[in-house]
Amino acid sequence: MSILSDIILILLNGLQQGAIYVLLAVGLSIILGTLKFVNFAHGALYLIGTYAGVFIALNISLSNGKLFEWGFTTFGLDLGFFAALVLVPILVFVVGLLMERFVARPFYDRPDTDQILVTFGLAIVVQELFRILFGSNSLPFDQPETILSFGSFAGIPVSGPVALPIVGNFPQWRLYVIGITAVLVALVYIMVEYTDFGLVVRAGTRDAEMVRLLGIKITRPYIVVFGIGAALAGVAGVVGGPLNVVNPTIGTNILVPAFLTVVIGGVGSIAGAVVGGIVFGLTTAALVSLAPAWSQVGLYAIAAIVLLTRPQGILGDEEVAP
Amino acid sequence: MSEEDANPNAKDANPSSSEALVGSDLFGRWEQLRGREGTVVGLTAIFVAVFPWLFARAPVVSDFLQGYQSLATLILIWGIFAIGFDLLLGYTGLLSFGHAAFWGGAAYASGIVAKNISGDPIVMVVSGTLFAILLAWLLGFLSLRRGGIYFSILTLAFAQMMYFMAASPLAFLTNGENGLTGVDVGNLFGVIHLEADIPSIGGMLLGTWLYAFVGFIFVAAVAVAYRILNSPYGMVFRAIRENEQRAEFVGLNVWRYKLMAFIISGAFAGIAGSLFTIHGAYVPLQSLFWTESGDIVVMTVLGGAGSMFGPVLGVGVYLYIENIVSTVQALTIPFTDIVLIKDFGFYWHLLLGIVFVAVVWVVPDGLWGIIGRVRTFVSDRMGGER
């Protein structure tokens, strides 16, 4: 009984932890695979998503930072969590479009190291902007009680425990995180694999020059891919925010595991990003309950082992990897 | 073009230039001299000798700069780190995001040696550096199997692994989150107390014995790095940066040279890391965190990767903004009381980030590259027949 329930708990917690990595990694991976652009500012998009989520969903009182000094004591629209879940991806999608147009495009023809450097610098700038505006303190971002509540309709409860067979009570919100991730990733997968748009994107991944010679404007799919990747990072910020702390360093802190997820899964492969995220999530969850001191070390050790034995990643394709 | 690339030409400059006009003759002589190792090391030594005085004690200049002795020492320590890092990034073309492993690893190693075996500064530096070399050998062997962005990410992953190792599984050695406290740094050669001021004129120029110790190692590091980079061995590093495949085809063992560049660079980081422990008598856990690797990347690129002194300039600018500009209350127009930006110091990191992005975008050869272009402009005017 107890061993089985422990295993299932580890699996569920691992999936939930992995879900956030998957959302970030799928975006990073399609950008890296398709556009051959190394985006060290992906964590900054997560950061923007989280703060935008707080802004749209809640109305919190500020106590720190320049916004407070300038006389804003409260911050937020208080539209509810569902609104944040819909609006934040749109907002971050637009941020992604702007970023592709004005940051990534001038750097496509420059070396990888320049791309890493400029996006790393950008990540610092975004992080510092948020630190200045909101202070270094953590913002409260509670897990939502209900979603879709308006007027007399009480909404669907999403917080609190839910009774599961074998393991007993489990925080309901975590299941929703897993569900939201699964749906979104499936949508992106269908779009890339089964639509005309996806066909162009995949062709561009193989040989962008050939696609251009065939008379297809590849810049438009490119900018959309960047936007979608960014929007996924925004969603990760909204659903992941309530599970972790919210402060200006979360962007740079989540970047490293997210990148490793992409690399161990295999660049340019959505399935790879999912596998990578789940491997990381399960490893972390297992080590947290078995050997807490080693939980973080294990993550990096796994990444190192995979990269050394299978450099193109678990599901990677040698031809696509830059 | 970086300055070093010009040096081989400067060395065997056309002798007929000595027959040119007197004004350009002096300039031509300087052009010949400035490429020589003796000149470079000599000028570095002079700079190291007057830097703390100018920075912290000279009338007018130091009042304007607001510098202090301990920051001068810190700039030289990070300078050694940056020279080593540039050897890898600027000359071999490998972007490591994990150099905190060598910096912090050496800092911990020397601190642990000081606590358990001997606090002799030389023993500390040697043990820290040895540890960094061994670690660089191991991590380089593993990370260099992959090129490009994978190399950056692998080094990042290994360094983060070190960080989390120090944070909890090895906390019995490293004291975990609190950092390694209570490091007792002994006397140099058993007699010289490093924190003490140097008597007489030396004290006026250099300040403390610690600065003299760090300064001596800095000059030695510059000499070694200059010798490596201007030797045939260093030429191979540059060949690999320019075109790895071609270097391979010529028959060079690219893998071995890359590994060696990584180890040399790790050794420099190790020397700097050990000195950092001696300087602060404390090792923060932060010294292993990946933002520390990011800092050295920013410093090196800001100053100018691919040049000898660019990264040191970058270190100076970075640490100056971090430690002194950050304390500025309000930015005023000079000699007036008109406030341009309130709480200016508060924005220091943002300012650095913006400057960094601008440098990467517009002038990839950094601040030193700008200086180099000004120099070329002037020398074209002065010695047109060169």
Image (cartoon, coloured by chain):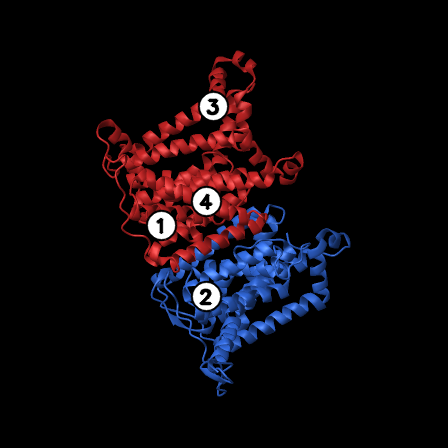
Q: Are marks 1 and 2 on the same chain?
A: no
Q: Residue A262 carries which label?
A: none
Q: Is mark 3 on a helix, strand or loop?
A: loop
Residue position marked by numbered label 4 in the rendering: B134
Given the current orientation, which residue lies at the most extreme top position?
A: B19
Q: Give the residue type at disc 3.
A: Arg
Q: Chain B is drawn in which colour?
A: red
When the figure is inspected, residue B181 is found, relative to residue B244, above or below; the finding is below
> Relative to A59, does residue B206 appear above or below in the rendering?
above
Q: Distance between the residues labelled 4 and 2?
A: 43 Å
Which residue lies under the disc numbered 2? A51
Query: Nearer the viewer's eye, disc 4 or disc 1?
Result: 4
Say what secondary structure mark 1 lies in: helix
Residue carrying label 1: B344
Front in this rendered view, residue B12 or B342 = B12
| Front residue (pair A155, B315) | B315
Q: Distance between the residues labelled 4 and 1?
A: 43 Å
Gap in Å between the C-alphas at discs 1 and 2? Answer: 25 Å
The residue mark sitting in front, 4 or 3, is 4
Tell which of A109 and B276 is nearer to you. B276
